[in-house]
Amino acid sequence: MLLIPCPWCGPRDEAEFHYGGQAHVAYPADPAALTDEEWARYLFFRDNPMGPFSERWNHTSGCRRWFTVTRDTTTNAITPETSR
Amino acid sequence: MTRRDREVLSFTFDGRPYEGRQGDTLAAALLANGVRRVATSVTLGRPRGIFGAWTEDPTAVVQIDRPFPEPMVQATTIPLHDGLAASSLAGRGRLSPDPDPARYDATHAHCDVLVVGAGPAGLTAALNAARAGARVILADDRPEVGGSLPDTGEPVEGRPGVEWARAAAGSYVALPDTRLLTRTSVVGYYDHNYLVAVERRGERAVTRERVWRIRAGRVVLATGAHERPIAFAGNDLPGVMLASAARAYVNRYGVVPGRRAAVFTTGGGSGDAAHDAARDLAAAGVEIAEIVDARQGGLVTGVRGDGEVRAVLIGRPGGPAREVEADLLLVSGGWNPVVHLFAQAGGELRYDDRIAAFVPGRPPEGGQSVQVIGAARGVFTTAGCVAEGLAATSPPDLPSTVTRSSRESRVPVDASAPGDAPAREDAGPSGEAGAQPLWLVPADDYTTHFVDLQRDVTVADLQGATSAGLRSVEHVKRYTTAGTAHDQGKTSGTLTSAVIAHLLGVDVGALGTTTFRAPYVPVSFATLAGRDRGALHDPVRVTAMHDRHVERNAVFENVGQWKRPRYYPLPGEDMEAAVLRECRAVREAAGVLDASTLGKIDVRGPDAAELLDRLYTNMISTLKVGAIRYGVMCRADGMVFDDGTVIRLAPDHFLVTTTTGNAAAVLDWMEEWLQTEWPDLRARCTSVTEQWATVALAGPGSRAVLAALAPALAVDAESFPFMTWRDTEVAGIEARVCRISFSGELAYEINVSWWYGQALWDAVLATGTVTPYGTEAMHVLRAEKGYPIIGQDTDGTVTPADLGMDWIVSKKKPDFVGKRSHARADTARPDRRRLVGLLPEDPDVLLPEGGQVISTGHLPPPPVPMLGHVTSSYRSAALGRTFALALVAGGGNRLGDRLYVPVNDTLIPVTVAHHVLYDPESTRRDG
Ligand SMILES: [Zn+2]
């Protein structure tokens, strides 16, 4: 049970959150301009690093806000990211 | 209190009555009665006795029959109580067919310091931390504090150990913000210092067991050490016992486990634990036949006895053996620090040659903050343990946030309690060395050299595994099952590693251990379920009209957490008859459906229309105030995610409906896009599902019903056209009426405040011309019209075009979620599975939902080419026959084709039809 630092509510149990996968995968500005492969990369391809990983969480059972943290996938150490 | 002063308790074992004493475990009481064989081994059917004295015991697994059946419980941990009935097992227990009448619950706790283990080290650490002002929880799985002190009778700081421990515990609990949890096993150590413990509160407590979920600032593990066995021939025979266990039976329970004992030791422990045990047993009247010390070359090569030990064989392997008469053989193969929780936390272990055991090595990283003290890290002297407890929790070592020294002055402190005096003895971390690693006694035949007594795994089995080529201790574990029993390898783990290392000729430290996993001791499912069972397993959501549905004998179905009436059978009707009648009523007169469970989301803001344009496949911003539009949402991959209606209440205000089961997911979806991609959009989404009760009135007679109930409303088709809404009073209740239809008939959805839902329902039925219908009839009616149910006719691989709904996908909008995916080559394939109707050639045959669709009238050899599957299948009153919806490859190009659905051994011929089977021109929606 991770202890996740919600930027609005403080540290809360993982059970209050939903996982949102890799962070900083922006919706393309002009999807129509992308090739099928570029679009597929946006849709389906995600990193799977051993070590620090920027990921999104949603405090679904709390303030319902989305935020981003860096979690070390080898130790589960979590550091808040200041940006949204 | 001596044994004879304790209260007498009656119990039965295998049907025979016995007497024990208050404070006994079942195992202690059995030994006191001379019962030594208590189980039969699971695979080999060998007699098994009592090997340990607490949770480390691998053999004495029994069935509890009364007060309530419980399978596979360790006799060494069952507190004896009056009326207990238990019986021996051969490996597998029996679950009760009756519900457990006991209550179980759970609680959460937070503390600055959690100390696990209330022996000399843990007690000292907890007391010291509490004195420094920390919020402390001290948990120990025993009924009383002191750790091994009641087993050994050793003194601490010049006082009898048990007395010292009670005084320390007394001082501890008198301090503020302290909690002492006895009979509480910490079973799991999870991320970020989250630990789970199980408190056994007793048969008479309000809750029998309680789960503690503890988030600790810091964890101090003072979990002690387990003595370990030695592998020799017949080392599983009842009468073979860990030396420490025998000592515990004598000192803690006042029970002598035999009359004449031999001792087989490799040395090690505090002083020399096996010699101390022999001394204590002798003092209790047990004759000590011989002490065989491996350090002096002595070996026990086997035991003799039919069902239990009668004699011990002493000698050299292959040489002649001396037979020494004894009914008890005490074994001491060294000590294993209890590192389970440390390893669960992610800590690394290292092999310590000095004590021939694995000890805590590199601590875990991440959010764990853990320290191991005392015997759990190989410090085996009592004084050393006390010193470790002090050092671990001295104020400079505590996080500054937990040091609240102002508390101290207000707290009366027992000056004689431990912790005040410095440790007098040498308290270095060296502890006691001297264990001679002797893992197994060499022999020609290893088939009765047991390493795991619970799983019947022998040295011969390990030989089989290594000669089969296995090199990893994890692989050997899975190949032989060694260490997989309820005891989690407490006695077998290190021995197994060591024997494998010996067989492979490698260093045991390099070979390592298997992974330590929770739970440390067995935990029942009833405990984990707690109160979340039966009616409390999951929240049940009911509508404002629920009582009326119950009164009408509705048969309910679960839709998410909602209870929805599926149909309302009249006396003598089965489901089929009821549903046909309800469908006919809607098509020919008027029906009423409780539609309150549909998800409703209020969307407001200057950019609300823009938000909905981006999320729905069709255009929403062009919708006029007062009008309603059906819409479909896709995921970014282009697949249909949800559908529903959008009504525009004001230029900046919409109400959207979702499917019942997807309401929360759709709200999440909208909020995610708003927050993460489009934070510039000024729009807010609010769930209002439970603010609006909804009654759907459907059928050609519905206009007259509404007209009677809403006299102020102009109900003619011109004044109140399809896909518009009006605010009015219905049956005197403020209402919003929407002219939408999910059946193809003239229909209205009347929305009122949830509070008035039942009043509205009653008013509609009081007209006497309306038939209530349930979700099953609703499904049939919509299927006749070819309306898909998202999640039933779709499965996450279906586009709007696959559903025959190209018309709902805007060509004008530059983008919406999913649009780019609709341009992928795959979504344009002509052979994609499309929604079609299927008409069985025999109009009485009902196809099974999920049935596969194939093109041949015979079943070809596998793999059978499958064209698709049946998604919905019903009997239709309007069509006078059965029909189905299906997703079929090439769909629309197969109209009129004959296909087949294999059901059991027959192939059912069907004709492909358009998916809209009823009123394709939509002539009925205006009534
Ligand atoms: Zn929050």
Image (spheres, helix red, strand yellow):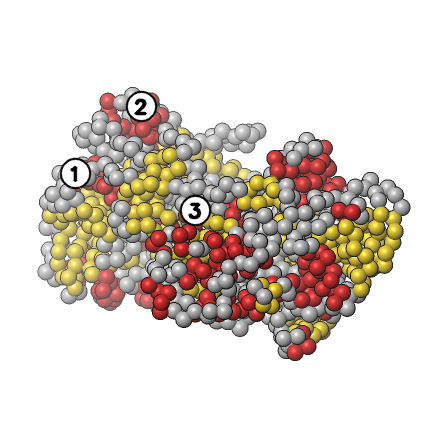
Secondary structure type for disc 3: loop
Residue drawn at x 60%, y 44% as measured from the top left:
B358
Mark 3 touches mark 2? (CB < 8 Å): no
Q: Chain of mark 2?
A: A
| Residue positioned 70% across, 66% down in the render | B250
Q: Which numbered marker is on residue B680?
A: 1
Identified by mark 3, the residue type is: Gln
Residue B164: horizontal and vertical position, in percent?
A: 55, 67
Reading the image, the residue beneath label 3 is B368
Instruction: State how far apart marks 3 and 2 are (Cα).
Output: 41 Å
Q: Is residue B68 above or below residue A25?
A: below
Say which label, 1 or 3, has the lower sequence index. 3
Q: x, y (%) of residue A62?
A: 29, 52
Chain of the residue displaying label 3: B
Amino acid identity at mark 2 = Glu
- Label 3 or label 2, whichever lies nearer to me, is 3
**Front in this rendered view, residue B281 or B325:** B281
Q: Does label 3 lie on the same chain as label 1?
A: yes
Horizontal side, residue B400 vs residue B252: left or right: left
| Location of residue B22 by image quarter | bottom right
Quadrant, the C terminus of chain A: top left
Residue type at the position of mark 1: Asp
Q: For the residues tagged 1 and 2, is the chain the same?
A: no
Task: Report helix, strand or loop for mark 1.
Answer: loop
Q: Position of B311 compared to B9: left or right?
A: right
* Nearer the observer, B744 or B650: B650
Horizontal and vertical percent position of residue B584: 32, 54
In percent of the image, x 20 and y 45: which residue is there? B646
What residue sits right under mark 2 in the picture? Answer: A38
